[in-house]
């Protein structure tokens, strides 16, 4: 029912954005000719968690996304992505934006809408690395905001900057557009990507927002992310580090209760190797500090098998050492289909 309802909404939007006389052209060729493309991602998983207090297991449709993109020409793109995740109360708009520019005549792109801030080496849907489970670095950096953004692409990569009205404000400065972010991603040689990103208030990351006082924070603390991705032949490697550039005020964030403001940081390293044409083996090592109840040390392994183009089944194991001195082991079997 969820998937059918989401699909109806996407097709309805496609009908609205098509020019008069084209709204019934729901064939692949008709949609492509009108500049409309559809995409979807479906992920189902079975998991078992061995924790200190209680063992748990679950079967769930963990993620479903449906997107529609309208690009009638080279300088205009409008897109909407709908999301359902296990634990969410219904379906929500994950991303919705319009972008102008990007043509040969106007290489600069102006984007307005709801986006995931480009802070870190991850994608908003699907798997960002070798393992599908969000890394500690992704959990610390991921932020979703309504933004106004400008970007410029050139031969070596892309640079961008944007503003947003963040979810966490300083006391007495509510409802102001004061969150700034900037990022650059360069590819100096084939297969190598190097990225750096800055956001003026790391408290606006989705996970840290939950830890902040509801009536506002004393001071904003900026965050910095750097990452390197290298893919060549059967090998894939990714390393990322994100940190708050200083400690938060004790009144704003002191999750460990030591009387000193926390300075969250996280590191993630993943490697993968295709031992067969359709079989990839991979591993992760990660650390975090001053990051709530997230693991301080995490490591694990995964086997990904591509059933056919766009469909992957995986078996993943992760071990985490938690701040309270306990640990947990998680085994996840996952089927992901993207089309």
Image (cartoon, rainbow, N blue to C red):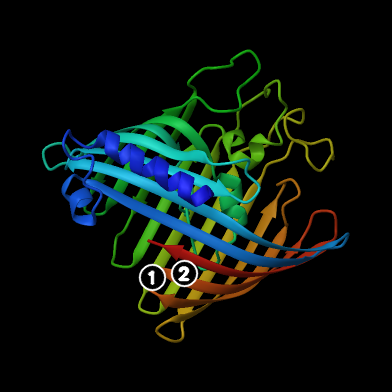
Q: Which residue sits at x=73%, y=27%?
A: 213
Residue 211 lies in quadrant: top right
Q: Is residue 124 visible?
A: no
Label 1: few (<14), some or many (≥20) within 10 Å? some
Residue 85's x, y, as percent?
58, 49
* Residue 221: mark: none
Name the one closer to the observer, 151 or 103.
Answer: 103
270 displayed left or right of 320: left
Mark sitting earlier along the chain (1/2): 1
* Residue 231: mark: 1
Q: Which residue sits at x=20%, y=45%?
A: 35
Name the one closer to the observer, 59 or 171.
Answer: 59
Q: Is residue 319 above or below residue 289?
A: below
Q: Is residue 199 visible?
A: yes
Q: Which residue is mark 2?
A: 237
Q: Report the residue that reaches farthest toward the right.
A: 53
Q: Which residue sits at x=43%, y=86%?
A: 276
Q: Is residue 89 above or below residue 195?
A: above
119 displayed left or right of 233: right
Residue 171's x, y, as percent?
66, 17
134 displayed left or right of 83: right
Residue 55's x, y, as percent?
83, 64
Q: Report the residue that reaches farthest toward the top.
A: 172
Find the distance from the CA under tag 1 to the CA under tag 2: 6 Å
Do tag 1 and tag 2 residues touch (Cβ < 8 Å)? yes
| Quadrant (top left, top right, bottom left, bottom right) of the C terminus | bottom left
Secondary structure beneath label 2 = strand
Secondary structure beneath label 1 = strand
Q: Report the residue that reaches farthest toward the bottom.
A: 276
Residue 196's x, y, as percent?
43, 48
Q: Is residue 169 above or below residue 228?
A: above
């Amino acid at each position: 029912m969820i998937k059918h309802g989401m699909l109806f909404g996407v097709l309805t939007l496609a009908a609205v954005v098509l020019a008069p006389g084209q709204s019934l052209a729901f064939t692949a060729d008709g949609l492509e000719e009108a500049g409309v493309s559809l995409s979807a991602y479906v992920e189902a998983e079975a998991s078992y968690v061995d924790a200190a207090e209680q063992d748990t297991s679950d079967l769930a449709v963990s993620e479903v996304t449906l997107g529609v993109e309208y690009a009638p020409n080279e300088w205009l793109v409008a897109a909407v992505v709908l999301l359902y995740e296990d634990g969410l109360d219904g379906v929500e708009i994950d991303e919705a934006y319009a972008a102008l520019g990007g043509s040969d005549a106007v290489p600069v792109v102006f984007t307005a809408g709801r986006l995931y801030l480009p802070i870190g080496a991850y994608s908003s849907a699907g798997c960002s690395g070798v393992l599908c489970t969000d890394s500690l670095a992704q959990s610390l950096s991921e932020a979703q905001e309504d933004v106004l953004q400008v970007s410029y692409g050139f031969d070596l990569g892309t640079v961008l900057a944007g503003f947003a009205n963040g979810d966490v404000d300083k006391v007495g400065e509510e409802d102001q557009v004061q969150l700034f972010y900037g990022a650059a991603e360069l590819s100096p040689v084939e297969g190598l990507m190097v990225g750096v990103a800055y956001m003026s208030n790391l408290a606006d990351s989705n996970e840290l927002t939950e830890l902040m006082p509801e009536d506002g924070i004393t001071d904003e603390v900026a965050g910095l992310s750097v990452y390197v991705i290298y893919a060549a032949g059967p090998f894939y490697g990714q390393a990322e580090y994100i940190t708050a550039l200083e400690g938060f005020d004790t009144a704003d964030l002191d999750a460990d209760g030591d009387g000193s403001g926390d300075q969250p940081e996280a590191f993630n390293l993943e490697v993968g190797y295709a031992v067969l044409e359709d079989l990839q083996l991979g591993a992760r090592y990660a650390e975090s500090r001053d990051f709530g109840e997230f693991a301080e040390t995490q490591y694990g392994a995964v086997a990904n098998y591509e059933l056919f183009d766009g469909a992957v089944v995986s078996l993943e194991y992760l071990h985490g050492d938690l701040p309270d001195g306990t640990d947990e082991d998680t085994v996840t079997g996952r089927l992901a289909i993207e089309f």
